[in-house]
Image (tube, rainbow, N blue to C red):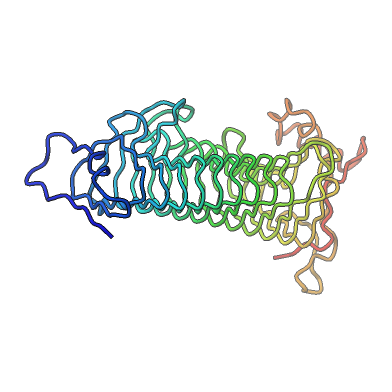
Amino acid sequence: MAFFALPALASPSPSPLPLQPLIDATPAGGVLRLTPGSYAGPAVIDKPLTIDGQGRAKIEGGGRGTVLTIRASGVTLRGATITGSGDSHDSIDAGVTIEGDDNHVGGNTLQDVLFGIHVKGGNRNRIEANRVTGKDLSLGMRGDAIRLWNSRHNRIEGNSFERARDLTFTNSPDNRIAGNRFHDGRYGMHIIFSPRLLVENNHLEHTGTGIIVLYSPQLVVRGNHVAHALTGGGGGIVFKESDDALVENNEIIHCSVGLQVDAQPQPVGVLTVRGNRFAHNIIGAFFYGESGGHRFENNRFEHNLTQVAVSAAGAGSANVWKGNHWSDYQGFDRNGDGIGDTPHEAWLFADRIWMETPITTFYRNSPVLELLDFLERLAPFSTPSLLLRDAVPRMH
């Protein structure tokens, strides 16, 4: 393997050293070790090589276009600070754009970039242990911290993202997104037409919505922590017409809605929702526009203002509830087997007013509606609707 290293600079250069000639001079398969200092982009990597910033080299885009574009396969980019992309959404100005396969981008710091890392038609790339901070812009003017388009079998692992718009995966099936952290954004993850993703052990906080899945079946969403998704829709996890997913062992805390399932009124594949904790949300789970048939097993619904809500009577009516823990369960466990002696049932009384007529949601939990709900429970003047029945509620 060939190595190409720069001599140490005697004194700081008044202007960054152009990076493109150094890339051009490095043979295919070689290693370009950057000595401490600043290097000027934008630059294009069009052959397999390794660029090693050794943790002390900075590559500056100067506010023009994408700082580094990888148009080859087998490239490694590590240990560099990449800063100063352009500000065009049309051209997707990014810190790093990847247009090849089997590349490794790891251990870099990206700052003051519109889009962080953009994978465009790239497969089997590894993007790991990078730190990405977007430009200091209002939320709507930011770019995505990471953006995959038409890309498969990539591994997005152990990265830290902040001050960006979304983490976006479009037309990109079979990718692994694991162990990442993201805060201060709009959508924690925005998944569109991307089936069979593994979304695992990510930590998302202070975003408008946590994970939203659109038209993307067969996902595994496991072990994620989503908190403080309270604006812009505010769902911790949202599924729209995305069938046959496994939602397992996630923790959804302090969101507008813990889990929202939204589908057209037609038969759909089921979701398996098990072992999750939905706690201190305004609504624990919300169902819109379909009868469901989803399976809810061994989840914890703790101290949500409303445990379960629907868009209208009948929505979610085919869901199966088994062995969930309900903080508002009013039964007993006289034989001490950990299972409530009577089923946990939730009925819709006056709550139907704000669930079926969204304009009245402002008055939810107001004294007037609370009194009306209390009176209707005492002496129903309309037929209540059964929302759910868990035959074996767990006590602990």
Q: Residue at x 48, y 42 (%)?
A: 119
Q: Is residue 13 left or right of residue 96?
A: left
Specify the quadrant of the image occupied by residue 262.
top right
Of 257 and 45, nearer the camera is: 45
Of 245 and 73, nearer the camera is: 73
Task: Quadrant for the C terminus, please.
Answer: bottom right
Of 316 and 69, nearer the camera is: 69
Q: Residue furthest left?
A: 10
The picture places residue 210, in percent across and down from the top left corner, at 57, 43
Q: Residue at x 42, y 49 (%)?
A: 73
The picture places residue 146, in percent across and down from the top left corner, at 47, 42
Q: Residue at x 48, y 38 (%)?
A: 185
Q: Residue at x 80, y 65 (%)?
A: 340
Q: Is residue 385 left or right of residue 121?
A: right
State the count of labels. Answer: 0
Task: Quadrant for the N terminus, please.
Answer: bottom left
- Please say if 326 is above or below 334: above
The picture places residue 381, in percent across and down from the top left corner, at 92, 35
Of 340 and 29, nearer the camera is: 29
The picture places residue 324, in percent across and down from the top left corner, at 74, 59
Q: Residue furthest front?
A: 27
Specify the quadrant of the image occupied by residue 369.
top right
- Please say if 136 is above or below 317: above
